[in-house]
Image (tube, rainbow, N blue to C red):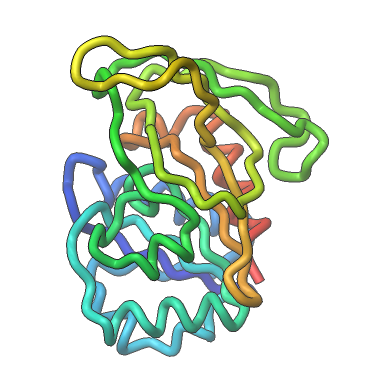
Amino acid sequence: MKKALIFQGGWQGHEPEDVANILGEVLEEEGFQVKITDTLTTLQEDDLTQYDLIVPNWTQGTIEQEQLQPLLEAVNKGVGLAGLHGGMGDSFRWEVDYQFMVGGQWVAHPGNDGVSYNVHILDPDHPLTEGMDDFTVVSEQYYMHVDPAVKVHATTRFPVAEGPYQTNGEVDMPVVWTKKWGQGKVYYCGLGHVAEIVKMPEVLKLMKKGMIWASR
């Protein structure tokens, strides 16, 4: 039986406990033995290499080096990493090594929550997005710094913005991407501001496919 670790916490506006439970149920349905923890000390106390998948769900916050380094090393050795929204893409803002592993970092969400936007599937023949069509989300639309080495599977279009958030014309921003970190596979989905969005059929499907894909 495959084993997965989900660590949840940080900023509570993203409903980390509820989201962790949703993702844990998805993994259990796929036959994973799931451990959910609400403390980062687990990262230094557990042998992380025993897991096939680690799911970060910790927005902002800080992490000690004795917690971060085992995480980086476990993924480097082949443990999968998969997560969503700020729980993976806006964690530990001072830790550039973590951001390097993830493949990006949150910058802004112009308009805040409640923005209606389209998610465009780039490669419907890929196992991660096979059979999926474009869909609309009403939530935060993440604008991110993105590693140019990532493989992008879905995007959203940002128009020219008014007010303090302005872009130089329209731009396609990655929403779903994958990359490698050593021997480990990394999956990220920018959707999932709160549990209600995570429960959307399209988001659940993306996360299910992504977590299975990333798993060792």
Tell me: 104 left or right of 130. left
Left or right side of 22 for 60: left
Q: Residue at x 28, y 23 (%)?
A: 110
* Extreme residue in the front direction: 168
Q: Nearer the viewer, residue 96 or 13?
A: 96
- What residue do we see at 26% from left, 52% from top? 59
Q: Position of residue 168 (x, y in %)?
A: 41, 20
Residue 85 versus residue 41 in the image, above or below: above
* x 29%, y 81%: residue: 67
Q: Quadrant of residue 93?
A: bottom left
Q: Residue at x 44, y 33 (%)?
A: 199
Quarter the N terminus occupies:
bottom right
Q: Quadrant of residue 126?
A: top right
Q: Position of residue 169 (x, y in %)?
A: 45, 16
The C terminus sits in image quarter:
bottom right
Residue 103 x, y percent position in the rendering: 49, 55
Task: In the displayed orientation, state which residue is furthest to the right.
Answer: 125
**On the picture, is 174 further left or further right than 88?**
right
Comparing 39 with 87, the one in front is 87
Where residue 156 appears, as percent x and y from the top left, is: 52, 24
Q: Where 166 sits versus 63, above or below? A: above
Note whether 47 is above or below 122 in the view shown.
below
The count of marks equals 0
In the image, 51 versus 186, the foreground residue is: 186
